[in-house]
Image: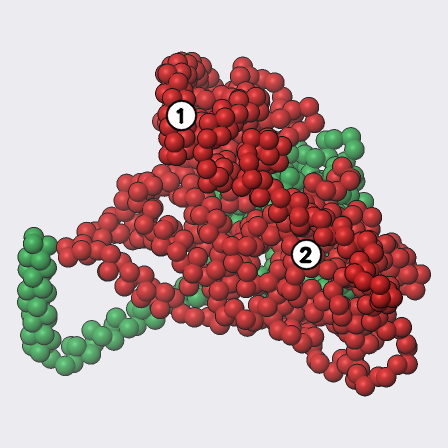
Chain colours: A red, B green
Amino acid sequence: MLEQLLIFTRGGLILWTCRELGNALRGSPIETLIRSCLLEERSGSASYSYDAPGAAYTLKWSFHNELGLVFVAVYQRILHLLYVDDLLEMVKDEFSKIYEPTRMVYNDFDDTFQQLKKEAEDLAEKMKKSKQPVKAINANLGKKQGLGQKGGVDGGNQKKSGDDGNGDKDGNKTKSYVYENGHTNGEHVSNGEVTVASGVNGKENRSSNTGAFDKDKLQKMRGGKGGKKTNTAAVSKAPKEELKKKPRVWNDSPPVSKLDFTDPVSENGTDNVPVVAMEHGESMMDREEIISSDSDSDEEEELGKNAKIETKKKGWFSTMFNSIAGKASLDKTDLEPALKALKDRLMTKNVAEEIAEKLCESVAASLEGKKLASFTRISSTVQAAMEEALVRILTPRRSIDIMRDVHAAKDQGKPYVVVFVGVNGVGKSTNLAKVAYWLLQHKVSVMMAACDTFRSGAVEQLRTHARRLQIPIFEKGYEKDPAIVAKEAVQEATRNGSDVVLVDTAGRMQDNEPLMRALSKLIYVNSPDLILFVGEALVGNDAVDQLSKFNQKLADLSPSPNPRLIDGILLTKFDTIDDKVGAALSMVYISGSPVMFVGCGQSYTDLKKLNVKSIVKTLLK
Amino acid sequence: MDFEKIETEVKIHVQKWVGEAQLLIQRTSPAQLYVAVAVVVFTMLLLILIKLFKRKTSNTIVLTGLSGSGKTILFYQLRDGSSHLGTVTSMEPNEGTFVLHSETTKKGKIKPVHIVDVPGHSRLRAKLDEFLPQAAGVVFVVDAVEFLPNCRAASEYLYEVLTAASVVKRKIPLLILCNKVDKVTAHTKDFIRKQLEKEIDKLRTSRTAVSEADVTDEYTLGTPGEAFAFSQCHNKVVIGEASGLTGEISQLEDFIRNLVKP
């Protein structure tokens, strides 16, 4: 049964709640919904799941954009209530009839709600009965080859798209796998894709289920070809473990001495390396960014041109008339062309396709049903809404004042530990040196920890930086456990009184399970104050995958009950992308963490803060 | 087709009028023309001068503070005298121009007050900049119960408000309102004041360390060298207490009335 149904204004006042369903909700699902979903521009998704100790709820919502009202329904996740969407729509229609901006009390709505609820439940009952024969037909179709089978899986998934019932899902899957036995491998791959491409809920459940089926059941049911996919996964694991073992000797020659070119650290070694000190000048973090104020005229021209191209011969008069008089209300078909154009524009600016899609859906959800003001075009309304949404996403949710955190840690007598993580080759070591330079300029003592014990030359690279900046570096050479090196580095920092410890880690791909495990161990053992994900601005759609997998692995593989996730993003190689700044948006949207630094060059001073307004302007140009 | 016809007709009409106007101008004597133009210019200048000198005193009060401190409840208490069914996190500002609920019983002409409740959620901070320039007074609402966990965030926000250009230039008075004092575990306003002063003092040093050119800081707060105190601010800063749920908002109403003279 429905736990609660709320109606509130966008300004925050609750107008009506259902009195019969008076059970107090555990935790604060509505607040979490607003903060983590609606304000994060995810209002285009179908539903939101909330977990509190002792309760698991699903929330569904609907907007009435013209009156500025939000309708939210809360119910237990284990119940699959099919009538909630229809109920929300009906409640929306009925309530908008009696709503007045000055009226605050709507007690008479209780009876109307009871009626609507009964209607919705009856409707759902009818639909359930009519779905039974459809199920049998799908099972018959499944017996055919290829497309028929795919259709069965699709239909099954669509029916269950609203819920997370594990029991039903397993039944569905076994059916489909039995049919697949006689088919080719291509089916299996497509099946995996179909299940992965489902909604916000139960994504983890589904992927773990397909994982289970991947390895166990399929190896039994399939012959050679299916096994290949799982074998490659197994093979990639094996060499990593072999690395830990002794190198194999192929003939009777004496064992080759270990290939380790670490120089013993010498303090007064051959110092041809000049000391940098403050000679490079002010780091760009402290320089104010001068935003060029382009006139809006060229923007208007472009829009005007587009509008003219789209309209037909007698079109100009009707568009002028519409823009002067104002249209009745916007609906999806009106918004579609403008949104599509906006989405394409975002994608040309290197925003990941998935993110652009979700953003457009969210903007559509917030504009549907709104009345166009007179003298405005649809495209300009959509543009304004999108601009606001972008500013909202890129504005940090929490303070990114690192200096303040450093001072707070200093007061407590502990060093402030920052860990740089990321995939291979994004610029972790370079940007670590830049951050060290910036901190040094503000009279903070820094220490570097060389926990990249894998890549050849990584320790020497950091040693050179440390020598140039004249800061201590803690290193233990190669082939050591990075977690232990980091721990000892922090202890050393407490001993010699360094304020900040910057920990460099080896680059790793987000799919590499053993390396991600090692990383989460490092984080668990050391509990750093800041986990910075270093991502390059050149990345395209992969940014979404990288960040979501990193966060997921950090959450899954951590032995602690409250795993640490990525706290901030360091965007690198910003100078190479001209105006294709979309990677910043994709990364911030998918992870929710703010961009703390932007690396815009290869020397020590090339580090700056993210300027939200200029990025939004560039994205929508 | 129709539209094209209408177009051409409109064009013909316009041309006719232009021709007639030209004839009219040629007919009147130059002296009359000059007088007419002079009169128009003179009246325009007069209007502009009047607008410049007549400075309208604004009647806007801005309610701001962290998310969850109770601004929306206070807004509805001021307006209706009751908090209705409760509130959730605001996604948009609440604005209203009205006479305070407690004063609706008073006789005589009372000037309505324009009150704006700006959402406190960090992603919606930009909304504050829209309303600050026209504000006659700012109320910074602080949750007196959950003060210590949010102390840093609250003081950072307060610091931003105190150093905003419009607040500094126009010396907008500020009321720090400790809300939720009806609860037993609420801190006293003196404690809150001292904690805020300490935190802002620390912020001053770390912020000046960061910026000769931090984009939001246009001004250094207080007197350098001394520990920060609210009395050092150029604009008037007062501290008050209130309870949104029970309706104890007399200090807030006094502050508003002092600023927006009836």
Above or below for A93 versus A524: above
Q: Position of residue A202 (x, y in %)?
A: 56, 32
Amino acid residing under circle 2: Arg
Q: Residue at x 70, y 75 (%)?
A: A604
Are callouts 2 and 1 both on one chain?
Answer: yes
Residue A12 visible to the viewer: no
How many numbered discs? 2
Q: Residues within 10 Å of mark 2 (few under 14, many from 20)?
A: some
Q: The residue tagged with tag 1: helix, strand or loop?
A: loop
Closest to the observer, A377 or A216: A216
Q: Position of residue A356 (x, y in %)?
A: 46, 51
Q: Residues within 10 Å of mark 1 (few under 14, many from 20)?
A: some
Closest to the observer, A563 or B114: A563
Which chain is indicated by disc 2?
A: A
Q: The residue tagged with tag 2: helix, strand or loop?
A: loop
Q: Quadrant of residue A481?
A: bottom right
Side (left or right) of A222 relative to A241: left
Residue A183 visible to the viewer: yes
Which quarter of the image is occupied by the N terminus of chain B? bottom left
* Mark-to-mark CA distance, 2 and 1: 44 Å
Residue corresponding to mark 1: A143
Between marks 2 and 1 in the image, the one whose residue lies nearer the viewer: 1
Residue corresponding to mark 2: A508
